[in-house]
Image: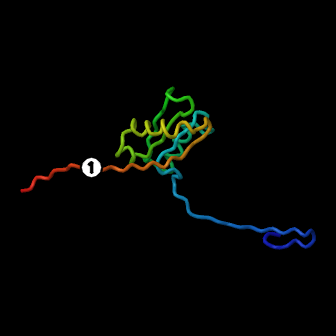
């Protein structure tokens, strides 16, 4: 009997629920895939094609890293910073903490500042 008392055995059950809406895809900026991830890079990319078509670009790492196989980067990030720059940051600050079978969600914010702009006055 859920939420009540089963008097014959003295068992009591209590249920707490908490729920909220999720946004798809569950990854907003970057997903780093380990080499032994159960779904593999092709499976993960196929999922992203359904839930976020044309939003992410997959960069294959090749033999450059023994643990990381691929990185999915939101294309809006690639408009602000080139893929080599993003991968450089990830290699230094994220890749060392990844295990082979993992998929790691990375929040990656890029701020751009432009200074020294000269405007000709008519």
Tell me the residue that label 1 is attached to.
Answer: 114
Looking at the picture, how far across and down is residue 30, in whole percent?
48, 45
- Image coordinates for residue 2, horizontal then vertical, percent: 79, 69
Residue 92 vertical placement versus 62 (above, below): below
| Image location of residue 21, percent across then percent down | 56, 63
Q: Residue at x 54, y 34 (%)?
A: 68
Residue at the top extreme, as displayed: 63
Q: Is residue 97 left or right of residue 75?
A: right
* The quadrant where residue 35 appears: top right
State the scheme by which the image is colored: rainbow
What x and y, as percent, mark residue 56? 44, 45
Q: Residue at x 44, y 37 (%)?
A: 87
* Of the pair 50 and 45, the residue shown nearer to us: 45
Q: Camera-side residue: 70 or 52?
A: 70
Give the SS element for disc 1: loop
User: What quarter of the picture does the N terminus occupy?
Assistant: bottom right
111 displayed left or right of 5: left
Q: Locate residue 16 relative to residue 62 in the image: left or right.
A: right
Against 4, residue 35 (above or below) is: above
Above or below: residue 17 compared with residue 110:
below
């Amino acid at each position: 009997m859920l939420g009540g008392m089963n008097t014959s055995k003295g068992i009591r059950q209590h249920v707490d629920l908490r729920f909220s809406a999720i946004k798809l895809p569950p990854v907003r900026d970057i997903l780093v895939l380990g080499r032994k991830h159960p779904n593999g890079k092709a499976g993960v990319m196929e999922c992203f094609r359904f839930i976020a078509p044309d939003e992410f670009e997959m960069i294959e790492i090749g033999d450059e890293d023994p643990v990381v196989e691929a990185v999915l980067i939101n294309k809006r990030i690639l408009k602000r910073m080139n893929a080599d720059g993003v991968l450089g940051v990830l290699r230094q600050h994220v890749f060392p903490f990844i295990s082979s079978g993992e998929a790691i969600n990375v929040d990656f914010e890029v701020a751009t500042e432009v200074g020294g702009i000269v405007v000709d006055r008519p």
